[in-house]
Amino acid sequence: MIYSGRVVTTTRLTRRQALISGACFCCVRASAQKRAEGTQAFATEEVAPGIYIRRGLDEDVTARNEDGIANIGFIVGRDAVAVMDPGGSLIDGQRLRAAIRQKTQLPIRYVVMSHVHPDHVFGAPAFQSDKPQFVGHARLPRALAMRADFYTKRLQDTLGKDRAGGIVAPTMLVQDHTEIDLGGRVLALTAHGLAHTDCDLSVLDRNTGTLLAADLLFVKRVPSLDGSLRGWLKELAALKAVTGRRAVPGHGPTGVDWPSGARDLERYLGTLLRETKEAIAKGMDLEAAVGSVAQSERSRWTLFDDYNGHNVTQAFKELEWEQ
Ligand SMILES: [Zn+2]
Protein backbone atom coordinates (compact mmCIF):
# COMPACT_ATOMS: atom_id res chain seq x y z
CA MET A 1 0.00 0.00 0.00
CA ILE A 2 1.06 3.59 -0.50
CA TYR A 3 1.09 5.66 2.64
CA SER A 4 2.07 9.32 2.69
CA GLY A 5 4.06 8.93 -0.45
CA ARG A 6 6.13 5.96 0.61
CA VAL A 7 5.76 2.25 0.23
CA VAL A 8 5.08 0.62 3.54
CA THR A 9 4.22 -2.80 4.79
CA THR A 10 1.37 -3.51 7.16
CA THR A 11 2.08 -5.68 10.15
CA ARG A 12 -0.99 -7.42 11.50
CA LEU A 13 -0.79 -8.39 15.15
CA THR A 14 -1.51 -11.85 16.41
CA ARG A 15 -4.85 -12.25 18.20
CA ARG A 16 -3.12 -12.25 21.58
CA GLN A 17 -1.10 -9.18 20.71
CA ALA A 18 -4.19 -7.40 19.50
CA LEU A 19 -6.03 -8.19 22.71
CA ILE A 20 -3.31 -6.88 24.96
CA SER A 21 -2.29 -4.03 22.74
CA GLY A 22 -5.21 -1.79 23.48
CA ALA A 23 -6.83 0.22 20.88
CA CYS A 24 -4.46 3.07 20.44
CA PHE A 25 -1.89 0.60 19.24
CA CYS A 26 -3.92 -1.88 17.31
CA CYS A 27 -2.73 -1.72 13.76
CA VAL A 28 0.95 -0.90 13.64
CA ARG A 29 2.36 0.01 10.27
CA ALA A 30 6.09 -0.39 10.06
CA SER A 31 7.92 1.54 7.41
CA ALA A 32 10.54 -0.30 5.39
CA GLN A 33 12.64 2.81 5.55
CA LYS A 34 12.58 3.85 9.19
CA ARG A 35 11.66 7.48 8.89
CA ALA A 36 12.27 10.82 7.26
CA GLU A 37 14.20 13.24 9.46
CA GLY A 38 12.26 15.99 11.18
CA THR A 39 9.04 15.61 9.25
CA GLN A 40 6.66 16.37 12.08
CA ALA A 41 5.70 19.95 12.73
CA PHE A 42 4.78 20.55 16.35
CA ALA A 43 2.22 23.26 16.92
CA THR A 44 0.04 23.90 19.92
CA GLU A 45 -3.23 25.76 20.18
CA GLU A 46 -4.25 27.78 23.24
CA VAL A 47 -7.70 26.28 23.82
CA ALA A 48 -8.28 28.31 26.99
CA PRO A 49 -6.04 30.87 28.72
CA GLY A 50 -2.83 29.06 29.66
CA ILE A 51 -3.86 25.66 28.25
CA TYR A 52 -1.96 24.61 25.14
CA ILE A 53 -2.86 21.49 23.15
CA ARG A 54 -1.15 19.76 20.22
CA ARG A 55 -3.68 18.02 18.01
CA GLY A 56 -2.69 14.44 17.33
CA LEU A 57 -2.92 12.99 13.84
CA ASP A 58 -5.89 10.73 13.08
CA GLU A 59 -3.59 7.82 12.26
CA ASP A 60 -2.14 4.75 13.87
CA VAL A 61 1.50 4.91 14.84
CA THR A 62 3.98 4.94 11.95
CA ALA A 63 7.66 5.70 11.63
CA ARG A 64 6.69 8.87 9.83
CA ASN A 65 4.27 10.24 12.45
CA GLU A 66 6.53 9.21 15.35
CA ASP A 67 3.46 8.33 17.39
CA GLY A 68 2.34 11.94 17.51
CA ILE A 69 -1.24 10.76 17.30
CA ALA A 70 -2.75 11.80 20.64
CA ASN A 71 -3.83 15.23 21.80
CA ILE A 72 -1.21 16.27 24.33
CA GLY A 73 -0.33 19.56 25.96
CA PHE A 74 0.38 21.62 29.03
CA ILE A 75 -1.19 23.99 31.53
CA VAL A 76 0.64 27.05 32.83
CA GLY A 77 -0.01 28.39 36.34
CA ARG A 78 1.56 31.32 38.18
CA ASP A 79 4.38 29.20 39.62
CA ALA A 80 4.60 25.99 37.63
CA VAL A 81 3.59 23.95 34.59
CA ALA A 82 1.69 20.64 34.37
CA VAL A 83 1.98 18.40 31.31
CA MET A 84 -1.04 16.37 30.14
CA ASP A 85 0.13 13.83 28.49
CA PRO A 86 3.89 13.61 27.77
CA GLY A 87 3.50 12.26 24.21
CA GLY A 88 3.74 9.08 22.19
CA SER A 89 7.49 8.70 21.89
CA LEU A 90 10.71 10.24 23.15
CA ILE A 91 10.86 12.53 20.14
CA ASP A 92 7.21 13.55 20.61
CA GLY A 93 7.91 14.32 24.28
CA GLN A 94 11.04 16.29 23.42
CA ARG A 95 9.07 18.42 21.00
CA LEU A 96 6.39 19.04 23.60
CA ARG A 97 9.05 20.08 26.11
CA ALA A 98 10.58 22.47 23.57
CA ALA A 99 7.13 23.96 22.95
CA ILE A 100 6.70 24.52 26.69
CA ARG A 101 10.07 26.25 26.88
CA GLN A 102 9.07 28.57 24.05
CA LYS A 103 6.14 29.76 26.17
CA THR A 104 7.56 29.78 29.70
CA GLN A 105 10.61 29.04 31.81
CA LEU A 106 8.50 28.06 34.84
CA PRO A 107 9.37 24.66 36.34
CA ILE A 108 7.55 21.60 35.02
CA ARG A 109 6.32 20.19 38.33
CA TYR A 110 3.78 17.62 37.16
CA VAL A 111 3.57 15.22 34.25
CA VAL A 112 0.10 13.70 34.24
CA MET A 113 -0.07 10.32 32.52
CA SER A 114 -3.74 9.83 31.63
CA HIS A 115 -3.63 6.06 31.05
CA VAL A 116 -1.47 3.16 29.92
CA HIS A 117 -1.58 3.55 26.13
CA PRO A 118 1.80 4.35 24.62
CA ASP A 119 0.61 7.15 22.34
CA HIS A 120 -0.04 9.15 25.52
CA VAL A 121 2.84 8.24 27.83
CA PHE A 122 5.94 7.02 25.98
CA GLY A 123 7.25 10.59 25.80
CA ALA A 124 7.64 10.70 29.60
CA PRO A 125 11.45 10.17 29.56
CA ALA A 126 11.79 13.59 27.86
CA PHE A 127 10.75 15.18 31.18
CA GLN A 128 12.88 13.19 33.62
CA SER A 129 15.54 15.90 33.87
CA ASP A 130 12.85 18.29 35.17
CA LYS A 131 12.30 15.96 38.15
CA PRO A 132 8.52 16.44 38.13
CA GLN A 133 5.93 14.33 39.87
CA PHE A 134 4.80 11.73 37.33
CA VAL A 135 1.11 11.44 38.16
CA GLY A 136 -1.06 8.43 37.36
CA HIS A 137 -4.10 6.42 38.35
CA ALA A 138 -3.50 4.04 41.26
CA ARG A 139 -3.85 1.14 38.81
CA LEU A 140 -1.42 2.59 36.26
CA PRO A 141 1.76 0.93 37.64
CA ARG A 142 0.20 -2.52 37.31
CA ALA A 143 -1.09 -1.80 33.80
CA LEU A 144 2.31 -0.49 32.71
CA ALA A 145 4.09 -3.49 34.19
CA MET A 146 1.84 -5.90 32.32
CA ARG A 147 2.29 -4.23 28.95
CA ALA A 148 5.69 -2.53 29.11
CA ASP A 149 7.65 -5.17 27.21
CA PHE A 150 5.10 -5.51 24.44
CA TYR A 151 4.60 -1.79 23.95
CA THR A 152 8.32 -1.05 24.10
CA LYS A 153 9.22 -3.67 21.51
CA ARG A 154 6.47 -2.57 19.16
CA LEU A 155 7.43 1.08 19.33
CA GLN A 156 11.14 0.38 19.03
CA ASP A 157 10.47 -1.77 15.96
CA THR A 158 8.53 1.10 14.41
CA LEU A 159 10.54 4.16 15.44
CA GLY A 160 13.97 2.82 16.36
CA LYS A 161 15.38 2.51 19.86
CA ASP A 162 16.70 6.05 20.06
CA ARG A 163 13.33 7.66 19.32
CA ALA A 164 10.82 5.34 20.92
CA GLY A 165 10.96 6.52 24.52
CA GLY A 166 9.51 4.28 27.16
CA ILE A 167 7.92 3.78 30.50
CA VAL A 168 8.46 6.08 33.46
CA ALA A 169 6.99 4.79 36.70
CA PRO A 170 4.48 7.14 38.31
CA THR A 171 5.72 8.89 41.46
CA MET A 172 2.30 10.18 42.55
CA LEU A 173 -0.76 7.96 42.45
CA VAL A 174 -4.40 9.04 42.44
CA GLN A 175 -6.81 6.69 44.17
CA ASP A 176 -10.03 8.65 43.77
CA HIS A 177 -9.72 12.44 43.64
CA THR A 178 -6.87 14.82 44.30
CA GLU A 179 -5.81 18.36 43.46
CA ILE A 180 -2.58 19.88 42.28
CA ASP A 181 -1.84 23.59 42.55
CA LEU A 182 0.19 25.38 39.89
CA GLY A 183 -0.09 28.71 41.73
CA GLY A 184 -3.46 30.43 41.43
CA ARG A 185 -4.58 27.50 39.33
CA VAL A 186 -5.88 24.32 40.94
CA LEU A 187 -6.33 21.21 38.81
CA ALA A 188 -8.81 18.59 40.00
CA LEU A 189 -7.73 15.06 39.10
CA THR A 190 -10.15 12.14 39.04
CA ALA A 191 -9.21 8.46 38.89
CA HIS A 192 -12.03 6.72 37.04
CA GLY A 193 -13.53 3.26 37.22
CA LEU A 194 -13.08 0.76 34.39
CA ALA A 195 -13.88 2.64 31.14
CA HIS A 196 -11.62 3.25 28.10
CA THR A 197 -8.96 1.33 30.10
CA ASP A 198 -8.69 0.31 33.75
CA CYS A 199 -6.54 3.34 34.64
CA ASP A 200 -8.14 6.48 33.16
CA LEU A 201 -7.34 9.81 34.80
CA SER A 202 -9.06 13.09 33.89
CA VAL A 203 -8.12 16.66 34.78
CA LEU A 204 -10.44 19.61 35.34
CA ASP A 205 -9.02 23.13 35.25
CA ARG A 206 -11.43 25.01 37.47
CA ASN A 207 -10.18 28.44 36.40
CA THR A 208 -11.38 28.04 32.83
CA GLY A 209 -13.92 25.21 33.15
CA THR A 210 -11.81 23.02 30.86
CA LEU A 211 -12.02 19.25 31.19
CA LEU A 212 -8.97 17.40 29.87
CA ALA A 213 -10.66 14.07 29.33
CA ALA A 214 -7.87 12.22 27.48
CA ASP A 215 -9.21 8.99 25.99
CA LEU A 216 -12.41 9.03 27.99
CA LEU A 217 -13.48 11.28 25.11
CA PHE A 218 -13.00 10.55 21.41
CA VAL A 219 -14.38 12.98 18.81
CA LYS A 220 -14.56 12.16 15.08
CA ARG A 221 -11.88 9.43 15.42
CA VAL A 222 -13.50 6.13 16.28
CA PRO A 223 -13.16 5.25 19.98
CA SER A 224 -11.22 2.24 21.13
CA LEU A 225 -12.45 0.02 23.91
CA ASP A 226 -9.80 -1.49 26.19
CA GLY A 227 -11.64 -1.51 29.52
CA SER A 228 -15.39 -1.90 29.94
CA LEU A 229 -18.24 -0.80 27.69
CA ARG A 230 -20.75 -0.49 30.52
CA GLY A 231 -18.11 1.16 32.67
CA TRP A 232 -17.26 3.72 29.99
CA LEU A 233 -20.91 4.70 29.54
CA LYS A 234 -21.18 5.10 33.31
CA GLU A 235 -18.04 7.24 33.60
CA LEU A 236 -19.10 9.32 30.61
CA ALA A 237 -22.45 10.04 32.26
CA ALA A 238 -20.62 11.15 35.41
CA LEU A 239 -18.23 13.33 33.39
CA LYS A 240 -21.15 15.05 31.68
CA ALA A 241 -22.20 16.35 35.08
CA VAL A 242 -18.81 18.03 35.53
CA THR A 243 -19.22 21.79 35.47
CA GLY A 244 -16.88 22.36 32.56
CA ARG A 245 -17.66 24.51 29.56
CA ARG A 246 -15.33 22.77 27.16
CA ALA A 247 -13.45 19.51 26.92
CA VAL A 248 -10.23 18.41 25.30
CA PRO A 249 -10.58 14.92 23.77
CA GLY A 250 -7.69 12.44 23.69
CA HIS A 251 -8.21 12.14 19.92
CA GLY A 252 -9.96 14.49 17.53
CA PRO A 253 -10.20 18.29 17.65
CA THR A 254 -8.35 20.12 20.43
CA GLY A 255 -11.56 21.30 22.02
CA VAL A 256 -15.32 20.76 21.99
CA ASP A 257 -18.23 22.28 23.90
CA TRP A 258 -19.12 20.35 27.00
CA PRO A 259 -21.17 18.30 27.65
CA SER A 260 -22.62 18.39 24.10
CA GLY A 261 -19.23 17.22 22.77
CA ALA A 262 -19.87 13.80 24.30
CA ARG A 263 -22.95 13.17 22.16
CA ASP A 264 -21.34 11.19 19.30
CA LEU A 265 -19.27 9.01 21.62
CA GLU A 266 -22.30 8.26 23.74
CA ARG A 267 -24.31 7.30 20.65
CA TYR A 268 -21.54 5.03 19.36
CA LEU A 269 -21.02 3.28 22.69
CA GLY A 270 -24.79 2.96 23.15
CA THR A 271 -25.13 1.40 19.69
CA LEU A 272 -22.25 -0.96 20.42
CA LEU A 273 -23.94 -2.04 23.65
CA ARG A 274 -27.40 -2.49 22.20
CA GLU A 275 -26.40 -4.30 19.01
CA THR A 276 -23.86 -6.56 20.71
CA LYS A 277 -26.49 -7.61 23.23
CA GLU A 278 -28.92 -8.31 20.35
CA ALA A 279 -26.29 -10.35 18.51
CA ILE A 280 -25.62 -12.47 21.59
CA ALA A 281 -29.34 -12.92 22.23
CA LYS A 282 -29.78 -14.17 18.62
CA GLY A 283 -27.02 -16.71 19.15
CA MET A 284 -24.70 -15.01 16.67
CA ASP A 285 -21.05 -16.03 16.95
CA LEU A 286 -18.31 -13.47 17.43
CA GLU A 287 -17.25 -13.40 13.80
CA ALA A 288 -20.78 -12.65 12.61
CA ALA A 289 -21.18 -10.00 15.31
CA VAL A 290 -17.97 -8.28 14.24
CA GLY A 291 -19.32 -8.04 10.70
CA SER A 292 -22.64 -6.50 11.67
CA VAL A 293 -22.57 -4.61 14.96
CA ALA A 294 -22.48 -0.77 14.84
CA GLN A 295 -22.14 -0.64 11.03
CA SER A 296 -24.55 2.32 11.00
CA GLU A 297 -21.70 4.30 12.59
CA ARG A 298 -19.21 3.53 9.82
CA SER A 299 -19.43 6.80 7.90
CA ARG A 300 -19.28 8.92 11.04
CA TRP A 301 -15.77 8.08 12.27
CA THR A 302 -12.24 8.00 10.91
CA LEU A 303 -10.31 4.73 11.37
CA PHE A 304 -13.64 2.91 11.84
CA ASP A 305 -12.50 -0.26 10.07
CA ASP A 306 -9.30 -0.40 12.13
CA TYR A 307 -11.06 -0.41 15.50
CA ASN A 308 -14.74 -1.30 15.35
CA GLY A 309 -14.06 -5.03 15.07
CA HIS A 310 -11.79 -4.86 18.11
CA ASN A 311 -14.48 -2.94 20.00
CA VAL A 312 -17.16 -5.48 19.12
CA THR A 313 -14.85 -8.27 20.28
CA GLN A 314 -14.26 -6.53 23.61
CA ALA A 315 -17.98 -5.82 24.04
CA PHE A 316 -18.92 -9.39 23.13
CA LYS A 317 -16.54 -10.83 25.75
CA GLU A 318 -17.92 -8.46 28.36
CA LEU A 319 -21.59 -8.96 27.64
CA GLU A 320 -21.83 -12.67 26.86
CA TRP A 321 -21.53 -13.45 30.57
CA GLU A 322 -24.61 -11.39 31.32
CA GLN A 323 -26.96 -13.67 29.37
ZN1 LIG B 1 -6.06 5.22 24.86
Image (tube, grey):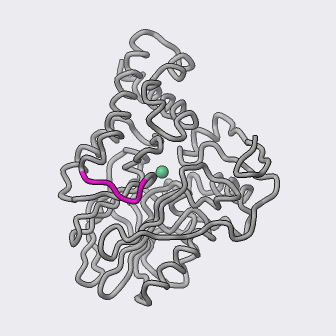
Q: Position of residue 296 (x, y in %)?
A: 43, 25
Direction from residue 256 to residue 121 in the image, left or right: right
Outermost residue on the top side: it is 282
Q: Is residue 285 above or below residue 43?
A: above
Depicted 285 relative to depicted 248: above or below: above
Q: Does residue 289 appear to the left or right of 191 in the view shown?
A: right
* Quarter of the figure that contains the C terminus: top left
Q: Residue furthest front?
A: 5
Q: Nearer the viewer, residue 260 or 82?
A: 260
At x 42% / y 22%, what residue is drawn? Answer: 320
Which residue in the rendered view is the most extreme toward the right?
A: 33
Bounds of the magenta segment? 253-258
Image quadrant in which the N terminus is located: top right
Q: Position of residue 307 (x, y in %)?
A: 54, 37
Report the side of 82 relative to 124 (left or right): left
Residue at image coords 45%, 57%: 115
Residue at 40 percent across and 88 percent down: it is: 106
Residue 83 percent across, percent down from the top left: 43, 72
Image location (x, y in percent) of residue 117: 52, 54
Main SS of the magenta part reads: loop
Q: Is residue 55 above or below residue 182?
A: above
In the image, is 266 to the left or to the right of 94? left
